[in-house]
Image (cartoon, rainbow, N blue to C red):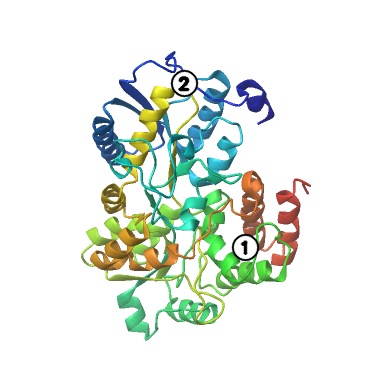
Amino acid sequence: MALVLAASGCAGGTGGGDDSDAEATSLTVLDYYTDAPEHQQWTETLASCGRRAGVRIEHTSVPPASLVPQVLRQASSHTLPDLLMLDNADLQQVARTGALAPLDTFGPLNGATKGATSGTASGIDTRDVTEGILSAGTYDGKVYGLAPYVSTVALFYNKDMLAEAGVAVPRTWDELRAAAARLTRPGRYGMAVDANATFEGTWQFLPFLWSNGGDESKLDTPEAAQALRLWVDLVKSGSMSASVLNWNQADVHDQFAAGRTAMMINGPWRIPALKADEKLKWGVAPVPVPRAGQPPVTPLGGEVWTVPRSDSTARQKKAAQVLGCLNTPANTRALAAQHLTVPSRAGVAAEYAQANPSMSVFVDSVKDARVRTARLGVRWPQAATGIYTAIQSALTGRQTPEEALKDAQRIATGAGL
């Protein structure tokens, strides 16, 4: 990071060679939507917004793991694209380099300038975007990115299996323990999560940590240990497979779809595949919480769109217009429907939930969802590493939850082990 800061100074910049007065006729766009259908959908949406702004779009996608390293290299060489998509957890790391332009550079936020909502004039309309979602694109008090849609996780359950076992949908941790035990039988576990040694494993644990009052800024607390103890108890009791240590979210879905687990934690992006199986009767509910009546605090997922700094004012303005277009109410709804996510505008999301009942749980959960970088900012990756390391250690029995989280805290603070 220090090398990037030194090399890039206060600006990123594109490699287009345009000066600030040159007319912009095309824009380069970079994201990590490499999946063929998703890439094509985004190509079409970007092209449509480009036409509104009067520019041609050159759309490139790279694998998710390659995006941030490539962006940091481009920041140092002043070859950033004109419009850049980032996972919201990576926004602060990139904004810290000075490579991104604050969105208020292009007109007032949270207000309307004529044409802003259609992406045809300066100004980016953020009215009706909730504070939590807006914070996903914020660094050091400035908004650098805006998300057309967001996501989170919930509890999926097999309706037939719960009915056969006479089990109600669990709402609390105690109910989850009891339900998972009653649903477990030879060839089937009651519950499944992604507990692998990646940020995905941390992502799935966060609803349990946060809903119990735990905080990634201090992991060695009783609240954090209680949350990890829940997962340990499910594995020790046989209600959850020890293989969750190696499963990613796609693996968890496969176990659920095959009938090898009755419940799972997963995201709405799994719904199309679930709907495709006409024999599978499933439902979705909020992530169980420690105490009845409290809302779950889940992680806010999704990508934000940003405008890198450039020597070309014209290109930046056009990029801002395209960004504004992506975030119009109509496009947030259309994109959410395409990708099975939640529109970022509250009013649109409420209408969307009514039209899509299977999404209503996710829409409600997003209201209390938290950005992963909210507490630690650019130090979030260290804490995330500490958390998934602790999960691995506790679920394998190498350490107690308390011991594992003490080590996690040392990782989070950079003290090592």
Between discs 1 and 2, the one toward the N terminus: 2
CA gap, disc 1 and disc 2: 47 Å
- Residue at the image point whose x is 48% and y is 54% from the top: 247
Rendering coords of residue 251 (x, y %): 42, 54
Q: Name the residue under label 2.
A: 14
Q: Nearer the viewer, residue 243 or 370?
A: 370
Furthest-left residue in this view: 278
Query: What's the amino acid at mark 1?
Result: Leu
Q: Can residue 243 be seen in this view?
A: no
Q: Mark 1 points at which residue?
A: 395
- Residue at the image point whose x is 28% and y is 25% from the top: 55
Rendering coords of residue 380 (x, y %): 63, 48
Rendering coords of residue 328 (x, y %): 31, 47
Q: Is mark 1 on a helix, strand or loop?
A: helix
Q: Which of 416 and 363 is in front in this view?
A: 363
Q: Which of 208 and 402 is in front in this view?
A: 208
